[in-house]
Image (spheres, rainbow, N blue to C red):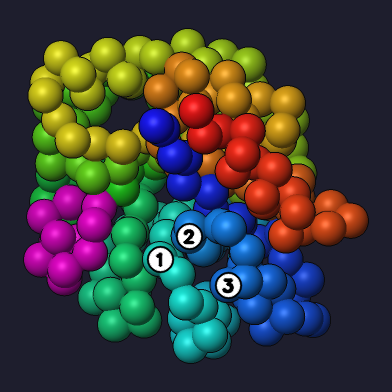
């Protein structure tokens, strides 16, 4: 049986009621907290920094999956490890020395993720795929929540799955952006293991029920 990991994106939470929304995730069937850190340089938006992550980590009872959308992520690797990050994803496009960055993340005891923008070709990961625990495929342009899903993503997931199989890697696949009950099952059938959902969960009338439904939909 395939059980998909559901990772609500805290970027879509109500920041005025952050503890309430964190408790909601703790009490739901969600598996991870997905936390986007944006610097206003790599992406045209600024999200939140270390103090907010520290506050989330204090209350979160599940895996903390941090997605860095920042330039020069190497400067902060140790900081994110100290804040309780379980998985740290850096952008392929922001790391001129990707292999070195991956080693530095592992040296701090975290699992390592590599995120790729919609225009970035899967083939560019061929030489490092065995060093990566998770590839995060951006299914929207990074920087803002609530965007429409890019349909080419299914093709990218299948292509990445083939690369992982061919290289005999243990890498898992995460999808970030525009995930809803309309595309979740198809994404998992294409090879996705982790689904990040933001607006779809937090703007729902009943977020806990929405998470349960996503879980049911992607367990088969």
Asked if residue 116 lies left or right of residue 109, the reply is right
Give coordinates of residue 107: x percent, y percent: 10, 66
Region of the chain picked out in magenta, as a range: 102-112
- Residue labelled with disc 1: 63
What residue appears at the point 29 percent right and 82 percent down from the top-left corner? 82
What residue appears at the point 74 percent right and 49 percent down from the top-left corner? 210
State the residue lying farthest toward the right. 205
Give coordinates of residue 88: x percent, y percent: 33, 59
- Residue labelled with disc 2: 32
Give coordinates of residue 112: x percent, y percent: 25, 52
| Closer to us: 138 or 22 | 22
Q: Mark 2 to mark 3: distance in Å?
A: 9 Å
- Residue labelled with disc 3: 26
Answer above or below: position of 136 versus 100: above
Of callouts 1 and 3, which one flags the residue occurring earlier in the amino acid sequence? 3
Q: Mark 1 to mark 3: distance in Å?
A: 10 Å
What residue appears at the point 35 percent right and 78 percent down from the top-left corner? 84
Of callouts 1 and 2, which one flags the residue occurring earlier in the amino acid sequence? 2
| Closer to us: 194 or 214 | 214
Answer above or below: position of 40 versus 122: below
**Pointer 1 with pointer 2, Cβ within 8 A:** yes
Of labels 2 and 3, the one closer to you: 3
Q: Mark 1 to mark 2: distance in Å?
A: 5 Å
| Closer to us: 197 or 4 | 4
């Amino acid at each position: 049986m395939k059980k998909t990991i559901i990772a609500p994106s805290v970027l879509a939470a109500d920041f005025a009621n952050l503890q309430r929304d964190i408790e909601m995730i703790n009490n739901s069937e969600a598996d991870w907290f997905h936390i986007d850190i944006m610097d206003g340089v790599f992406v045209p938006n600024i999200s939140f920094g270390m103090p907010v992550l520290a506050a989330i980590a204090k209350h979160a009872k599940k895996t903390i999956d941090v997605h860095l959308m920042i330039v020069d992520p190497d400067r902060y690797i140790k900081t994110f490890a100290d804040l309780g990050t379980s998985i740290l994803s850096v952008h392929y496009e922001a790391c001129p020395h990707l292999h070195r960055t991956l080693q530095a993340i592992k040296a701090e005891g975290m699992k390592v993720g590599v995120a790729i923008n919609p225009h970035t070709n899967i083939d560019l990961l061929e030489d490092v795929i065995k060093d990566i625990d998770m590839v995060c495929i951006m299914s929207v342009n990074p920087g803002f929540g609530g965007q429409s899903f890019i349909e080419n993503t299914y093709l990218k997931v299948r292509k990445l799955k083939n690369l992982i199989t061919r290289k005999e890697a243990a890498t898992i696949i995460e999808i970030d952006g525009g995930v809803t009950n309309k595309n979740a099952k198809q994404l998992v059938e294409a090879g996705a293991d982790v689904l990040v959902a933001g607006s779809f969960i937090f703007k729902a009338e009943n977020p806990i029920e929405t998470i349960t439904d996503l879980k049911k939909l992607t367990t088969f």
